[in-house]
Amino acid sequence: MANETNPKPTPAPSGPAEALSTARQVEELADKLTDCADGIHARVMRDIRRQGQDVPESEQAAARALLNAEMELRQRANWLYTEAAACIVSSLGQPQQHLIQLTVDAADKIRRITRIGDGITLVARLLGLAAAASTGQVMPILAAVEGLKTQLDVIAIDNAPAAPAASA
């Protein structure tokens, strides 16, 4: 539909929308990254409360690192909100739903993760995705998406139930 500020008609979307091809899609990614930051905060606070007062220094350091990463993830998500139009990527070649589902899966893994190292790496991958999305460039975004997918697969393997022992 044409109007005074946009004289060209807007084409109707055909098929699944390419990821990050509109400002709204960039904002949707920022929403999901913020959800992940919320999950990080809740997870760290839950772990701190469960530990009681005698928390080993190594676990305190991991909690501090995760809280710092949470703050950075929020800052990057906020930047994506304010600069959404500048972050549009026209040729990512992946559906928006796939990208959003990865961040939803990451938020779920943050809640259920059993190994702190997996959690730290997962958060680093989310930060990488946020940083890559802010460039608006295809290659860094695709690399970040692949890194996130790989980390989610590693976590799924690490959290899989142990196979029953074979009887002799």
Image (tube, rainbow, N blue to C red):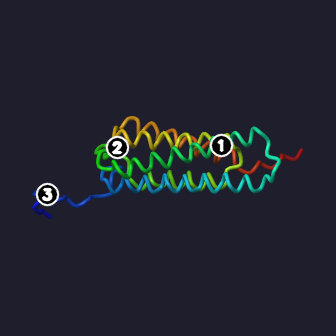
State the separation of the CA atoms marked 2 and 3.
24 Å
Q: Nearer the viewer, residue 163 or 114?
A: 114
Report the residue at 56% width, 47% height from top. Answer: 70
> Mark number for residue 117?
none
Q: Amino acid at mark 1?
A: Arg
Whether tag 1 and tag 2 are in contact, CB under 8 A, the answer is no
Q: CA distance from mark 1 to mark 2?
A: 35 Å
Q: Nearer the viewer, residue 63 or 14?
A: 63
Q: Nearer the viewer, residue 47 or 168?
A: 47
Image position of 127 with respect to 10: above or below: above
Residue 143 at what x, y percent from top left? 45, 36
| For residue 144, above or below residue 9 | above
Discs 3/1, front: 1
Cα–Cα gap, marks 3 and 1: 48 Å
Residue drawn at 68 percent across, 41 percent down: 62
Q: Earlier in the sequence, mark 1 or mark 2?
A: 1
Quadrant assignment for the C terminus: top right
| Residue 64, label in figure | 1
Residue 164 appears left or right of 157 = right
Q: Circle 3 is placed at which residue position? A: 6
Amino acid residing under circle 2: Leu
Mark 3 falls on what kind of element? loop
* In-image side of 4 versus 154 (left or right): left
> Which residue is at 42% across, 53% downward?
29
The numbered mark, 2 or 3, whose residue comes first in the sequence reads 3
Q: Position of residue 57 (x, y in %)?
A: 77, 39
Residue 92: which disc?
Answer: 2
Would you identify the image quadrant in which residue 131 lies?
top left
Amino acid, disc 3: Asn
